[in-house]
Image (cartoon, rainbow, N blue to C red):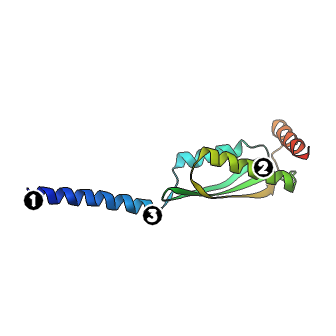
Amino acid sequence: AALLVALLVFRIGGTIALDAIKGILDLSLPLEQMEEISRICRRQPGVVEVEYCRGRSLGATRQLNIQLAVDERLGAEAVNTLVAELDLKVRQYLSNIAFLQISTTPTQAIEDDEASALVKAFMEANDA
């Protein structure tokens, strides 16, 4: 009977230790979450490409680093608005974000009438 109790205590102790170790490890976010964050960014008018999207989980909090190529025709104020809107959308999708960095690089947009119309509407909305 004492051996059975010792095995139970050992098993429970091992489970608690593993859970504690998982909580302090620096783990990558699940692929599904990273893909959805990339989709959220790509749907934003003015974003030409998501160059990279990296996410880490440290305990209960998350850290994200996103690099976007944005339409070079957007001014600084429009890009700042775009980043602020994306920050809000990503935080609404994923809770417990301790650090979120969204960086942008201006790039030539792919000429597409629909995309150009979206960029124009975005720029006009931010000028008003």
Graded by Cα atoms within 10 Å as few (under 14), some (14 to 19) or many (20 or more), the crowding at tag 1 reads: few
Residue 59: give its label: none
SS class of the residue under badge 1? helix
Query: How would you rate the neighbour count of disc 2 (Cα within 10 Å): few for under 14, some for 14-19, many for 20 or more?
Result: many
Chain-order first, disc 1 or disc 2: 1
At x 41%, y 59%, the residue is: 22
Position in image of residue 100 (x %, y %): 65, 57
SS assignment at label 3:
helix
- Disc nearest the viewer among 2 and 3: 3
Which residue in the protein does label 1 denote? 2
* Residue 108 seen in the figure: no
- What's the residue at 50%, 56% (across, down)? 60
- The answer to whether the residues at label 2 and label 3 have Cβ atoms under 8 Å apart is no
Residue ID for mark 2:
82
Foreground of the two, 85 or 2: 2
Q: How many marks?
A: 3
Q: Which mark is residue 24?
A: 3
Q: What residue is shown at x 33% (from left), y 62% (from top)?
A: 17
